[in-house]
Image: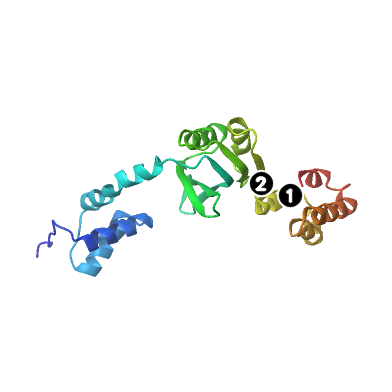
Amino acid sequence: MGEKKQTTLSDEIERKIIRMFALGMSYKDISQEIEDLYAFRISSATISAVSDKVIPELKQWQQRPLEAVYPFVCLDAIRDGRYQSKAVYRVLALELEGMKEILGLYLSEKEGANFWLSVLTDLQNRGVDDILIACVNGLTGSPEAINSLYPDSEVQLCVIHQIRNSIKYVASKHHKAFMADLKPVYRAVSKEAAETALNELEEKWGQQYPVVLQSW
């Protein structure tokens, strides 16, 4: 018995295909899902034609004008354990009104100063004149790129990544005790409380781990 063909897809089916494609499902899995739901099989070419319909909207979103000033911008990577060669790098901002906004998503095989220069140049070309605080998650080359294009921005490392980077230089036998003494620093309710906790941390661990203390 021959395979039943379907040449015209309803809006509902197209929306389902786009949703599954956005979730990262393969063409094979999408085809199987549609067959299970609607009892007919669609080709990879049909799936591609449907997913391509969102490209104009995507390009419009990628090129949209941005605000002139953002008080807080975070640069980080979204990685999928299945695909180690590439990552999607996300620029997430806090608007002056307090709303979160994704300014852009960028696909790249490797990070570095040149890559982040291209990302930040894109933001600048779309109207971003100033970033007050830029938070980076230990991404290679990002602080240098930020300082190059936005020299007045304050660059801060994400606390989680700062902790991870610090613990790498602490002997394993000291991890538990060091982390207990470090907690009052990054959980302090004020700058003054943090400075007091940092001084106490330095008195106890400064001679053994001066590089770690200096990073804080």
User: What amino acid does circle 1 point to?
Assistant: Ser
Q: Where is 168 relative to 146, above or below?
A: below
Q: Which residue is mark 1?
A: 166
Kindly indicate the quadrant of the structure image that contains residue 175: bottom right
Q: Position of residue 139 (x, y in %)?
A: 59, 42
Q: Residue at x 79, y 62 (%)?
A: 180
Callout 2: 10 Å neighbours few (<14), some, many (20+)? some
Quadrant of the rendering where the N terminus is positioned: bottom left
Q: Position of residue 90 (x, y in %)?
A: 50, 47
Horizontal side of residue 135 vs 105, given as left or right: right
First reached walking from the N terminus: tag 1 or tag 2: 2
- The answer to whether residue 79 shows anywhere in this view is no
Q: Where is 177 relative to 69, above or below?
A: below
Mark sitting on residue 77? none
Kindly indicate the quadrant of the structure image that contains residue 35: bottom left
User: What amino acid does circle 2 point to?
Assistant: Leu
Callout 1: 10 Å neighbours few (<14), some, many (20+)? some
Identity of the residue furthest to the left in this view: 1
Which callout, 1 or 2, points to the residue nearer the camera? 2
Q: Which residue is mark 2?
A: 157
Identify the secondary structure beneath mark 2.
strand
Q: Nearer the viewer, residue 101 or 215?
A: 101
Q: Position of residue 18 (x, y in %)?
A: 30, 56
